[in-house]
Image (cartoon, helix red, strand yellow):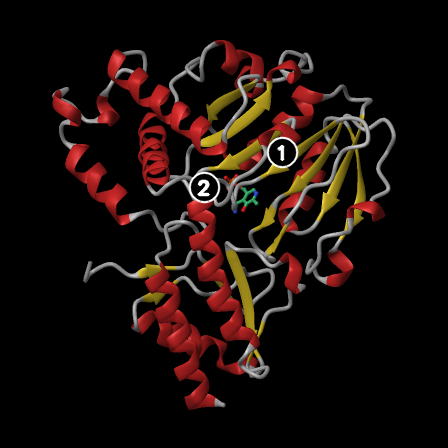
């Protein structure tokens, strides 16, 4: 609509317009219940129908096998950085981390408190612009799990395929590419994601875990971080983030209606392609540092050859209702996050603006 901007923020991020309008229409009185979802008991039949439908649509989207549990938790992906080692290993256990950006690095550092993690590959010396070839990974023979960040939100590098752990299970932070494309869940022991990029508001964290991995948490694990407690209580051990789960449910329903994740991936590929092409065809005026084969479909970092123009670029774009294009404070430059809910029209408008900006400033 006229008064909405194209929001390229990395998260919280843009949500589908039809989902927002649906939530608006149901806000005051949810489907004749006489109250909003925010006011309902989390144990009442209305909310149970909401969380069950959300889970069932997510299972449809990702084709989640029955031997996996889906948990709707709180605390963001950051809380999972601790919950994962606490639940999957003892303090003496070895685990492996592939560090392809800042988020993988944070996950590794948190795990140091609870087990013996080892960085078996780091892209830091190449400024996190690469994904390693899997044959180069020197995996520990006794690692309980191998952790990757499937899409590094700040650096814009994305795994296009996944390594096979030598011994333990594969664990992936999918916060910034969750539900952006089909994923073979059976290759993972655990997948986790904060909702606030592709699937809803912040406050909901989704964990998909193979059931046999549940039930071995370290003794000092807080009750709120113990997967067994949440699994046994269908994510209702305590009061869950009800409204956020409702919003995620509306997004899942929308993704199913779009034809599922294969269709969604097609749209995401098209958007990413026109943006990367605009960068690559600018004769160096715009640059993306990430190796081409591993460029993210979700987060597109780029710089200007004339770095002194970056502030002007961001300011002019904002005037044309394209906002939040500033790169992360740790890397600078620009970043366009083009999650599922960013329409093609938003990317087309950005590309047209980039070409015009170049014509005026080259
Ligand atoms: N992992 C990734 C890949 C992220 O992008 C983020 C958030 N930007 C986090 C973890 C941290 O998530 P949260 O803020 O939900 O704790």
Q: Residue at x 65, y 26 (%)?
A: 189
Q: Which residue is mark 1?
A: 81
Disc 2 Cβ-to-ligand 1 distance below 8 Å: no
Return the residue at label 2: 261
Residue 10 in view (yes/no): no
Residue at mark 1: C-beta within 8 A of ligand 1? yes
Q: Residues within 10 Å of mark 2 (few under 14, many from 20)?
A: many
Q: Residues within 10 Å of mark 1 (few under 14, many from 20)?
A: many
Residue 356 is situated, as x and y percent measured from the top left of the image, at: 39, 83
**Residue 275 in view, yes or no:** yes
Q: Is residue 179 left or right of residue 121?
A: left
Q: Against 69, is 111 above or below?
A: below
Q: If you read the primary sequence from the N terminus, does the residue marked by circle 2 or circle 1 appear first?
A: 1
54 versus 338 height, above or below: above
Which residue: 36% across, 36% down? Answer: 256
Q: Position of residue 253 (x, y in %)?
A: 33, 34
The image quadrant of residue 38 is: top left
**Which of labels 2 and 1 is toward the front?**
2
């Amino acid at each position: 609509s006229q008064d909405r901007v194209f929001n390229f923020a990395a998260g919280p991020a843009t949500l589908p317009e039809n989902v927002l309008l649906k939530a608006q229409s149901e806000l005051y009185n949810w489907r004749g219940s006489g109250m909003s979802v925010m006011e309902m008991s989390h144990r009442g039949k209305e909310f149970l129908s909401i969380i069950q439908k959300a889970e069932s649509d997510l299972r449809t989207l990702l084709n989640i096998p029955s031997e996996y549990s889906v948990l709707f938790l709180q605390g963001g992906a950051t809380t999972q950085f601790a919950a994962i080692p606490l639940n999957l290993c003892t303090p003496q256990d070895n685990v492996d981390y592939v560090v392809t950006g800042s988020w993988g690095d944070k996950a590794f550092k948190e795990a140091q408190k609870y087990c013996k993690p080892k960085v078996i590959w780091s892209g830091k010396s190449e400024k996190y612009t690469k994904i390693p070839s899997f044959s180069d990974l020197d995996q520990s023979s006794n690692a309980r799990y191998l952790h990757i960040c499937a899409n590094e939100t700040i650096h814009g590098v994305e795994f296009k395929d996944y390594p096979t752990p030598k011994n333990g299970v594969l664990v992936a932070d999918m916060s910034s590419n969750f539900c952006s494309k089909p994923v073979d869940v059976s290759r993972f022991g655990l997948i986790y994601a904060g909702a606030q990029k592709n699937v809803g508001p912040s406050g909901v964290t989704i964990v998909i875990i193979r059931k046999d991995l549940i039930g071995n948490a370290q003794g000092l694990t807080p009750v709120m971080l113990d997967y067994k407690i949440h699994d046994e209580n269908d994510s209702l051990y305590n009061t869950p983030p009800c409204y956020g789960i409702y919003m995620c449910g509306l997004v899942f329903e929308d993704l199913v209606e779009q034809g599922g994740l294969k269709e969604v991936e097609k749209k995401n590929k098209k958007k990413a392609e026109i943006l990367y092409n605009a960068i690559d065809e600018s004769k160096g005026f715009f640059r993306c540092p990430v190796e081409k084969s591993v460029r993210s479909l979700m987060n597109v970092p780029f710089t200007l050859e004339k770095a002194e123009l970056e502030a002007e670029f961001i300011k002019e774009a904002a005037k044309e209702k394209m906002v939040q294009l500033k790169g992360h404070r740790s890397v600078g430059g620009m970043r366009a996050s083009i999650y599922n809910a960013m329409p093609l029209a938003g990317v087309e408008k950005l590309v047209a603006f980039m070409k015009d900006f170049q014509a005026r400033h080259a």
